[in-house]
Amino acid sequence: MCLSDQIVIKSEDATCRFVPHKIALPDMETLVVDHPLVAHKLTTLRDVRTDSPTFRRLADELVTLLAYEATRDVRVADVTVQTPVAPAHGVRMAKPYPLVVPILRAGLGMLDGMTRLLPTAEVGFLGMIRDEETLLAETYATRLPDDLSGRQCYVLDPMLATGGTLAAAVQFLFDRGAVDVTAICLLAAPEGLAYMDKVFANSGRPIRLVTAAVDDQLNDSGYIVPGLGDAGDRLYGVV
């Protein structure tokens, strides 16, 4: 079965151009956020003429829109507050607070957009790099609590291409005790989705992915097509 045959899009209204829809995979929940503002910002990010300052600003804005959907299951606790008129029942963020983990370096460009929506979240860092020959992920830096027991984690990585880097990052968090991981990506490839689903098949752990779009495929170099190029280079320049 080819990868495109494995991906089934579900939406409530097929006549609407912009409808958030889930991709049916056996073991990983994936949400594609179809929205006019998301599509508008993503289109400008794709444009080769977009300079780095504009790219950074739009990526920041786009992440906040994606984070709104990604945090629908964030843990909250019931509270009662006193309004000027009467008591009111509501919720507040539950402890332990969520942990936001950008994957260096490109994931840093998504951090402000995420913490703008979740200002009480704690932030950890995970440095991973893809070997361009083997396409495998290697860890070169970590700044995370040793014990993540009971924590909800949000991983930030602009591109889900082959899936190797994101899968290694998610496994790293699970190995430290995280119980719930959501990844936020600007773009995803079908191959990356299939790889993630395969790696975590029957894991019994909640894994979700929220993205602005699923593109056509990967090219021979492991880049998403049509994609937007190298996100790190587009954000910070070639160094």
Image (cartoon, grey):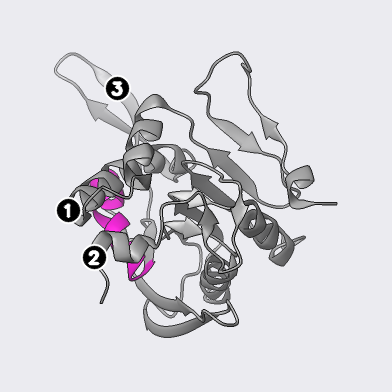
How far apart marks 1 and 3 lie (CA) works out to 44 Å
Question: Which dot, 1 or 3, sits closer to the camera?
Answer: 1
Amino acid type, label 1: Pro
Magenta span main SS? helix
Magenta stretch in the rendered image: 103-118
Q: Which residue is mark 2?
A: 236
User: Residue at 60% of width from left, 46% of height from top?
Assistant: 216
In percent of width and height, residue 103 lies at 39, 68
Q: What crowding class fits label 2: few (fewer than 14 Cα within 10 Å), some (14-19), or many (20 or more)? A: some
Q: Quadrant of the C terminus?
A: bottom left
Q: Are marks 2 and 1 in contact (CB under 8 Å)?
A: no
Q: Is residue 118 visible?
A: no
Whole-Å distance between the Cαs marked 2 and 3? 46 Å
Which residue was labeled with disc 3?
Answer: 88
- The disc placed on residue 53 is 1
Three-letter code for the amino acid on which mark 3 is drawn:
Ala
**Residue 111 is one of the magenta-drawn residues:** yes
